[in-house]
Image (cartoon, grey):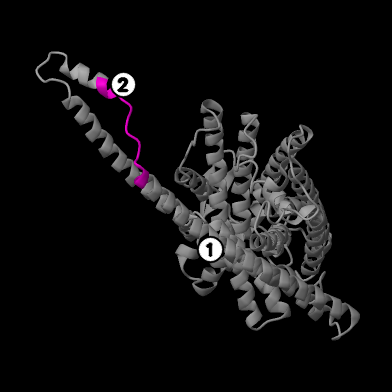
Amino acid sequence: MAREMQKNSMFIEHGPEAFDNGDIRKNLDDDGREKRTGTWLTASAHIITAVIGSGVLSLAWAIAQLGWVAGPAVLMAFSFITYFTSTLLADCYRAPDPVTGKRNYTYMDVVRAYLGGRKVQLCGLAQYGNLIGVTIGYTITASISMVAVKRSNCFHKYGHHVKCNTSNYPFMVIFACIQMVLSQIPNFHKLSWLSILAAIMSFAYSSIGLGLSVAKAAGGGPVRTSLTGVTVGVDVLGPEKVWRTFQAIGDIAFAYAYSTVLIEIQDTLKSSPAENKVMKRASFVGVSTTTMFYVLCGCVGYAAFGNDAPGNFLTGFGFYEPFWLIDLANICIAIHLIGAYQVFCQPTFGFVEKWCARHWPDNKFITSEHALNIPCYGVYYINSFRLVWRTVYVIVTAVIAMIFPFFNDFVGLLGAASFWPLTVYFPIEMYIAQSKLPKFSFTWTWLKILSWACLVVSIVAAAGSIQGLAQDIFDKGRESKRSKESIMAGDRDGECERSFNDNLRSMVPKGSPTSKDEGDNLVATTPKPRQDDEAKEYERKREKEGR
């Protein structure tokens, strides 16, 4: 039995000779897999790594759209909703009994055990679509943080008025190379050290951002805040206020979501004490910790920047000095995203590898493990299929990130589409099925009301994301058009200036031994002709059309 499980499982990393040892069964869990060693601490680290992204630094913008009343209220409401539904989902890890039932290794397995039918495919589509989108988005965000370090040094050296433009592409390549190496970590069970490191980094850059915001708020200055957020007619137009409110609510709702990896995290926990109890404790620690940072960073950031809060006050240069501290914060963001990328891609890796092993169990390329003795580490088992497939995945996500630099807006749309089914709908429906709640009972009714309310939030946030995506594409197209026109205008100005200079030089008598020097002096001291009024009017008209 154990030998057969080893053949078909991508999670057991023992060599064949280990099964000849009579004590090997002591190292296996009740399902024949390698004994799990996870605790509430490692699970909390996974949750914090998954939940606290660099988006914590954009919550000041979200609070600015909602104001002092609705902003903190929405933060607290979604922290409660996320924690509550995560406890429901934690009880579904085993079926039918939450303590003694059969283990389910993935979210799809849980939905299959309790609901079945087409809902399994819908769950898989929402979950893995979101996971893949997030890894692409993290590639973009990490490169932005790396670029911010280089730009910060440039601003410090040459002044804040300098553009200091830097390409993101080299940093995306660097990030992808790091992920190619880390992606060879076999599974979620071996990922705890990276999650702990990433969680520490998230605390570091959140604390730096919080400290800088406190210093700016304490320093005073003309900052406008209000109970209702940005003011219509002053900061934004009426329709823009509505769209921004939708986007802010969606950003806060998605900032807590980690249901896409909850079951995979719970599958790393040892069986005693019961996994569902440990997972609930880890969820409480993770959600309460993130809520504390969210409220502090969001509210203090709003107090510091007011209605003009940037989308990210570290990479968006809400701060310029002290430049070394901002560099440190952006480095911490990049390191955190390195770990977060792995947390979100490991479920996809495991799903594809198990599916292939199940369909081609006799294919040595897919199932065979080759032992490699690594100094200071021990024996590491290399799987050829894992090496190739995971490397290709990282390359593809990096290429997509390069082709679509505005993909983060699309990730927001994916988050809106997957928030309701994965975070709210499936946990509630599975709890109703598990508890056999009668229809129209009190508990059944209020759970349904909660589910439908969150559906409305998802729809509203999706609308805001679509508008934001369309606006971003339009802005980038307009920026590209202006850039081309600027280049063409520069070429025309260059030709005019060269012609004017040649005419000046022709005014100097030829044959004089100093004719060249005199001509150059005349060019240098004569004021250049400015564009005529017609050309200026043309440029103003094009500018107006662009707006």
Which residue is the extreme one toward the left? 511
Residue type, mark 1 in image = Ala
Q: Position of residue 530 (x, y in %)?
A: 35, 36
Residue sitting at x 72%, y 72%: 456
User: In which image quadrant can residue 329 be found?
Assistant: top right
From the image, tell me which residue sits under label 1: 470
- Decide which of 228, 445 is in the foreground and name it: 228
Q: Nearer the viewer, residue 238 or 345?
A: 238
Please rate how many residues cluster around mark 2, counting C-alpha atoms within 10 Å: few if below 14, some from 14 to 19, many from 20. few
Query: 386 or 424, which lies in front?
Result: 424
Residue 56 in view here: no
**Residue stretch rendered in magenta on the structure:** 522-535
Q: Is residue 345 magenta?
A: no
The answer to which of marks 1 and 2 sits earlier in the sequence is 1
Q: Position of residue 294 (x, y in %)?
A: 76, 50
Q: Is residue 134 visible?
A: yes
Q: Quadrant of the N terminus?
A: bottom right
Q: Amino acid at mark 2?
A: Thr
Of circles 1 and 2, the one toward us is 2
Residue 65, label in figure = none
Q: From the viewer's side, name the closer residue of 498 and 207.
A: 498
Image: 162 above or below 487: above
Q: Mark 1 and mark 2 in contact? Answer it, CB < 8 Å.
A: no
Label disc, if present, on residue 525 of the rendered structure: 2
**Crowd band around label 1 with a 10 angstrom C-alpha radius: few (<14), some (14–19), many (20+):** few
Residue 83 lies, in percent from the top left, at 80, 62
